[in-house]
Image (spheres, helix red, strand yellow):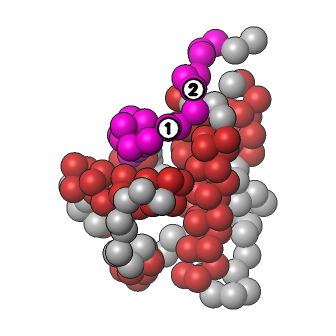
Amino acid sequence: MNHFAAADDISGRADLDVVLRRFYTAAFADPRIGPFFTEIAGTDLEVHLLRITDFWERALFRTAEYGRDAFAPHAALHSARALTAADFGRWVQLWRATVDGLHRGPNAERAKAQGERIALALHKRLAGPGASMEGEDGPGFVPLAALELRSLA
């Protein structure tokens, strides 16, 4: 039984702002990936939200300008502390759970798929072409817990 009612599909920047605020609030607090934002990068959430909302608005709707290099900040993080498959998996898990908790529809599905593609591409580029998608805790780029979360939705 569904214990919540997700809203309609993601329809624009205002919806993305809500999704991204909820996602990054969870990500900053997460014991696995939070330190990348809070301790290593020292991310200012409000500044980051402006940039990342542009990124996602461009990715989903092609209505915003995003001319930044999305790889460079991840490469800097990776050089300070290696980003692993499990780290990217946790990012994907939180991303999917956040989107699923707020929206249903083709744009929401595209946002989740795009998030997974981005995470996979970043991981492969950072770790090298022969990079394993196995986390140190075992198989599953998307951790089993993500599947468990989806089954509760």
- Write the residue at 72% across / 69% down: 133
Q: Amino acid at mark 1?
A: Ser
Q: Quadrant of residue 148?
A: top right
Where's residue 80, x and y in %? 37, 78
Where's residue 140, x and y in %? 75, 57
Q: Are marks 1 and 2 in contact (CB under 8 Å)?
A: yes
Q: Which mark is residue 110?
A: none
Vertical placement of residue 45 versus 131, above or below: above
Q: Quadrant of residue 50?
A: bottom left
Residue at the disc numbered 2: 8
Where's residue 114, x and y in %? 61, 58
Query: Which quarter of the image is occupied by the N terminus?
Result: top right
Query: Which quarter of the image is occupied by the C terminus?
Result: top right
Q: Nearer the viewer, residue 51 or 135?
A: 51
The magenta segment is 3-24
Q: Nearer the viewer, residue 43 or 15?
A: 15
Residue at the disc numbered 1: 11
Q: For the residue carrying disc 1, how many other residues have a C-alpha within 10 Å: few (<14), some (14-19), or many (20+)?
A: some
Q: For the residue carrying disc 2, how many other residues have a C-alpha within 10 Å: few (<14), some (14-19), or many (20+)?
A: few
Left-right relation of 148 to 7: right
Q: Amino acid at mark 2?
A: Asp
Magenta stretch contains residue 21: yes
